[in-house]
Image (cartoon, helix red, strand yellow):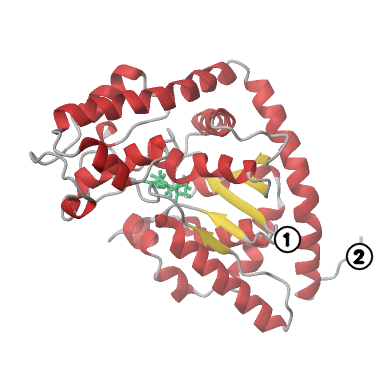
Amino acid sequence: TPRIFSGIQPSGNLTLGNYLGALKRFAEKQDEGIETIYCLVDLHAITVWQDPEALKKQTREAAAAFIASGIDPARSVLFNQSQVSAHAELGWLLNCVARMGWMNRMTQWKDKAGKNAEKQSLGLFAYPSLMAADILLYHATMVPVGEDQKQHVELCRDIAAKFNHDYGVDFFPAPLPLIEGVATRVMSLRDGSKKMSKSDPSDASRINLTDDADTIAKKFRKAVTDPEPLPDSLEGLEGRAEARNLVNIYAALADKTPAEVVADYAGQGFGVFKPALADLAVSKLEPISTEMSRLMNDPAEIDRILGQGAEKADAIAQPILQKTLEIMGMIRSR
Ligand code: AQP
């Protein structure tokens, strides 16, 4: 039976990239009636330094973003990873299955560690193995993610296959990455070759879900583009990464195809297109940020929702963890 698992790190302000690449699609999957399990991966967030008080706030804010984006805690399982200890336990077991060489080849590790690998936490290196545990713990079959996470889901498939092979079982199903839509890789507003990221030092490079209408309009107005008007077909956007990015964002927000957007604005300059994009973004994001602030007024209620979600997650995860331990030869006598 199909089961979806995905997560987001509560490591700072969520961006328009997280919304279009993840949250919006998470809600759509839930509404299609598929079983959906969504996790705020706080154990992943601490692979880089997180101030403890800030981490709590960011986790509640991310939970609020999920709910405000249409994820209904009654229909989806919504929880924070550290409240279900099976994640850390299976993560360890899979650390002993995964190979160092596999981790070394991860482009995100290479990007984040750079020339400073010696100074990174061991957790940052092992992050993809914990991510595999997150997914396999629920025997999830599909993982909706942005383009940047494709390699990690493929690694998860390799880890599942090696486990099954080493222990001679057919236990972990190989999950499929679901990379759909036109916003699988939203790019920085300052540099069309970099993805929009919550950890980019430049706030102008991204739209935060908590930005107000004026800030959103200003960031789009200042977004880097070329001086040419919009072409009359998609081919005319080749080699124009920044323009293509804004068209993709417009299309994803409007639930249109990029070709339709280009047809609507053919021959228009960015002086026309950017304000239209800003208006569209505000109309879609303002209800979300308003709902997020309303939810943030009652942190105890958010914690209660996460606690209930953790109980539901634990009920699925524990039997799978116990079975894994048994397969690996660990005595289970209580
Ligand atoms: N720019 C993006 N376009 C489309 N999808 C994106 N995602 C992230 N950025 C974009 C998707 O959002 C989900 C959650 O990502 P994450 O928080 O676990 O971490 P990340 O992929 O490392 O995202 P960030 O925003 O770049 O965080 P930092 O800066 O902390 O590393 C994933 O499905 C991801 O694909």
Residue 27 spot, x, y in % from top left: 57, 40
| Residue at the image position 73 percent from the left and 72 percent from the top | 171
**Amino acid under disc 2:** Ser
Which one is nearer the viewer's eye here, 75 or 129? 75
Q: How many marks?
A: 2
Element at label 2: loop
Residue 134 visible in the snapshot? yes
In what quadrant of the picture does the C terminus appear? bottom right
* Residue located beneath label 2 in the image: 333
User: Depth check: 197 or 53 in front?
Assistant: 197
User: Does residue 302 lie above or below 162 as drawn?
Assistant: above
Q: Quadrant of residue 304?
A: top right
Residue 40's label in the rendered image is none
Q: Is residue 207 above or below residue 92?
A: above
Vertical order, 181 against 190 (above or below): below
Residue 168 vs residue 14: left or right?
right
Residue in the picture at 31% in, 35% down: 206
Q: Earlier in the sequence, mark 2 or mark 1?
A: 1
Give the image location of residue 316, x and y in percent: 77, 53
The image quadrant of residue 31 is top right
Which residue is labeled 1 in the image? 1
Nearest the viewer among 239 and 50 is 239
- Circle 1: residue type: Thr
Check mark 2 vs ligand 1: CB closer than 8 Å? yes or no. Answer: no
Quadrant containing the N terminus in the rendered view: bottom right
Would residue 212 be found to the left or right of residue 155 on screen?
left
How packed mark 1 is, by other alpha carbons closer than 10 Å (few <14, some 14-19, many 20 or more), is few
Q: Nearer the viewer, residue 253 or 235?
A: 235
Question: Which percent across, then down, holds residue 82?
Answer: 64, 44
Question: For the view shown, which residue lies furthest in the right direction?
Answer: 334
